[in-house]
Image: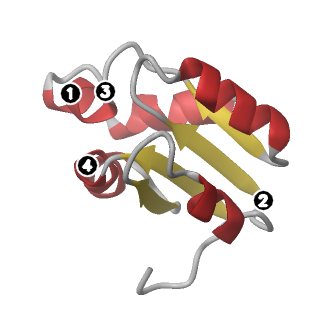
Amino acid sequence: PSEAIKDKVIICEGAKKSIVTWFHLATDYTVLASASNTTIKPALDATKDCGKRFLILDPGSERIAFKAAKENKNLKAVYLPVKIDNLFLAGHLSRHTFNAILNVL
């Protein structure tokens, strides 16, 4: 990243989904992209000392997300019924509701 990683981090599967999350949904978070659900380790390693970390993978990757959250400190898996960018583009997810979801976790 071109900026220092903040204490609150969101790791998304996919570059486009990460951009949508960073630009439209996240406030005061560093958002990192993972190319796929099998390449999340570098992002997890780079953020291991951060305070709060959220992992948002595509639907169908729930077991991978759950396993990662169980094995990594300060990591919460965020389960969404459809891809995060599609939720936003369809008007079902706003910055306010997204932050409310993260605050509940």
Q: Position of residue 27 (x, y in %)?
A: 46, 56
Are the residues at dot 2 and dot 4 in contact (C-beta closer than 8 Å)? no
In percent of the image, x 44 and y 80: which residue is there? Answer: 1
Give the residue at the far front of this rendering: 38
Q: CA distance from mark 2 to mark 1?
A: 28 Å
Q: How many marks?
A: 4
Which of 21/69 is in front? 69
Mark 3 vs 2, N-terminal side: 2
Are the residues at dot 4 and dot 1 in contact (C-beta closer than 8 Å)? no
Classed neighbour count for the residue bearing mark 3: other residues with Cα under 10 Å, few (<14), some (14–19), many (≥20): some
Of badges 3 and 2, the one in the foreground is: 3
Q: CA distance from mark 3 to mark 2?
A: 25 Å
Above or below, 7 relative to 3? above
Read off the residue under disc 3: 83
Q: CA distance from mark 4 to mark 3?
A: 11 Å
Q: CA distance from mark 3 to mark 1?
A: 5 Å
Above or below, 11 relative to 30? above
Read off the residue under disc 2: 51
Read off the residue under disc 1: 86
